[in-house]
Image (cartoon, grey):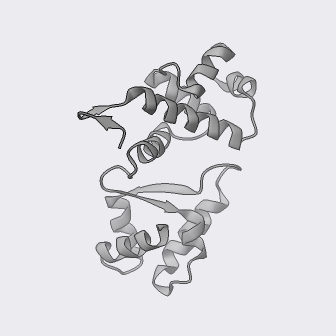
Amino acid sequence: MHTANGQIDTVAYQRVLGDEIRSLRKQRGWTRKELNKRLQTEISLQTLATYELGTRQCSVVRLVEICHALDVPAHEVLARVHERFFGDAPAGHLTLNLAAVAATDNPRLVPLRRWAAGRLHVLPPGASPEVHLDLPALENMAQLCQLPTVELIRILRGMTR
């Protein structure tokens, strides 16, 4: 955890956020100029670079705009930053790798395997195969698999290690 005396290291958090934005852009094979063309409002390439380097704070509205241009929901980007920064998924969430779930041979997870394969099929090129599931989603998946929620979570946690 990047805290001292209960305080968040905002400079380090900014760097992780910038790295996440840069990584998403590079996964798409875009230059900063190409990403900039897709933004609704014009910003300088220097400003975009300072966001990616984490040397300048990005407003929430600007972050949402950048994420929209990258075709990734801002809450998913922030969840990944949170996980990287604090070393855990947000409380009540579980991070799943869709490829691992789609490849499982666990007969109890057949409905989940089909769901993961379907999600992988529609993922944009270069998008992360990881998804964050909250407790209601996990409860629904457990019902589909006819498993108690805690049992499904135990199985899925075993797959993510």
Q: Quadrant of the N terminus?
A: top left
Left or right placement of residue 20 versus residue 94 in this view: right
Whether residue 70 is visible = no
Left or right placement of residue 60 versus residue 98 in this view: left
Left or right placement of residue 127 versus residue 141 in this view: right
Q: Residue at x 60, y 66 (%)?
A: 99
Q: Position of residue 114 (x, y in %)?
A: 56, 73
In the image, is residue 33 above or below residue 68? above
Observer-nearest of 157 and 72? 157
In the image, is residue 4 above or below residue 134? above
Q: Residue at x 50, y 36 (%)?
A: 16
Q: Residue furthest front?
A: 4
Q: Residue furthest left?
A: 5
Left or right placement of residue 29 versus residue 11 in this view: right
Observer-nearest of 131 and 71? 131
Q: Position of residue 108 (x, y in %)?
A: 45, 84
Q: Position of residue 128 (x, y in %)?
A: 60, 52
In the image, is residue 119 above or below residue 158? above
Whether residue 154 is visible = yes
Q: Residue at x 43, y 44 (%)?
A: 79
Q: Residue at x 62, y 31 (%)?
A: 69
Number of numbered callouts drawn:
0
| Quadrant of the image occupied by residue 103 | bottom right
Q: Position of residue 42 (x, y in %)?
A: 64, 14
